[in-house]
Image: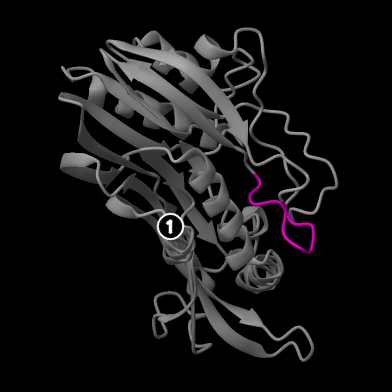
Amino acid sequence: MTRNLYLGASLDGVIGSRSLHEAILNATMVWMTVQASDVPARMALIADEIAAARPDLVGLQEVSLWRTGPADSPAPGGGTPATTVVYDFLGLLLDALAERGEQYVVVTTSTNIDAELPVLNPETGAPAADVRLTDRDVIIARREVKTRNAMSGNFFPRIPLTIGAAPEAQIQLVIPRGWNSVEVKFRGEWFRFVNTHLEVESPEIFGQVQTAQADELRRMLADESLPVILLGDINSDGEVLPPLTTLSYALLRGAGFADAWVDANPGQPGFTSGHDEDLRNPVSDPTRRIDVIFHRGPITALDASVVGGDPAHRTAAGVWPSDHLGVIATLRLGNARFE
């Protein structure tokens, strides 16, 4: 299974801020949107999805860790790191799975962006706290699954950001993206399981960085002798061709990777992305297929399905589990079948 948990708000406003003050205003809106998304209830819904399908391995993206601390970090490089945990998506998800009798363990984690900004009290306009976002990609597995050689890392191509115009009031950031990898033994046979989250595709420079990340991933796996399952949020649409999307999807297909959705559902779109930022759109109507389960080697896709778009499976407030839908595939490795 591949599942983007959604950090709870779009960061586009913060990333595009022209001044530090604007960034703080946008960060305040982000934090309010995250809180309104009802993170614990969303993680419980995703735990329901996993418990219903009982996949052996799950690749997770946007496994956010939100923390707060004293409002003392508006100056570049200053302040005390925020350490008070408000939302740990991974802990919430694992706890919810355990409550459902499903025992999953963390196999490997990559840490991507780790950034902090002050937010304002919406009533007074005064600084209220610093809010810190740590983004992670994680592989979890059923407790009985045998693994070895767990690895994780960040791609070399990444986006540099400068927020603010005056040098004395600028914040310099980079946006790293990550990957996880582990070797898995299933019924006597070994394969490599890889999870990733590539950069977004627009604006154009972001798409160029994304394609470079996909190429780094392709080269990383080029000499792999084991069968490979590669999945994640690749932010490259499997239903259209460049220039309507980036080259990343085509590049990975060209490296010998088959697409489980295409194999199991020929001619069906399988869209996975498109819920509103606040997750309150009344109808699930995704428009892009950017969450993908690839495979290479002696692997056969038996079926693939999309989860997370059932209108009956929302929070009590009508919030969807994520802005993405999840993808689950049942695959056969040689003579061994796994989900």
Q: In the rendering, at what x and y percent does residue 58 appear?
A: 40, 41
Q: Is residue 163 left or right of residue 315?
A: left
Q: Nearer the viewer, residue 103 or 225?
A: 103
Residue at x-position 68% and y-position 69%: 22
What scheme was used to colour the molecule? one colour
Residue drawn at x 47%, y 26% is 329
**How many other residues sit within 10 Å of disc 1, few (<14), some (14-19) or many (≥20)?**
few
Q: Which residues are magenta?
A: 314-323
Q: For this rendering, which residue is in front, 251 or 257? A: 257
Could one spot residue 143 in this view of the protein? yes
Badge 1 amino acid? Gly
Within the magenta stretch, is there residue 320? Answer: yes
- The answer to whether residue 72 is left or right of residue 77 is right
Q: Is residue 334 magenta?
A: no
What type of secondary structure mainly makes up the magenta span?
loop
Looking at the figure, which quarter contains the C terminus? top left
> What's the residue at 48%, 65% (across, down)?
92
Q: Is residue 333 above or below residue 130?
A: above
Q: Quadrant of the N terminus?
A: top left
x and y, in percent, of residue 138 in the image: 36, 49
Vertical placement of residue 151 versus 91, above or below: above
Question: Toward which corner of the image does residue 24 lie, by quadrant?
Answer: bottom right
331 up-or-down from 200: above or below: above
Residue at the disc numbered 1: 101
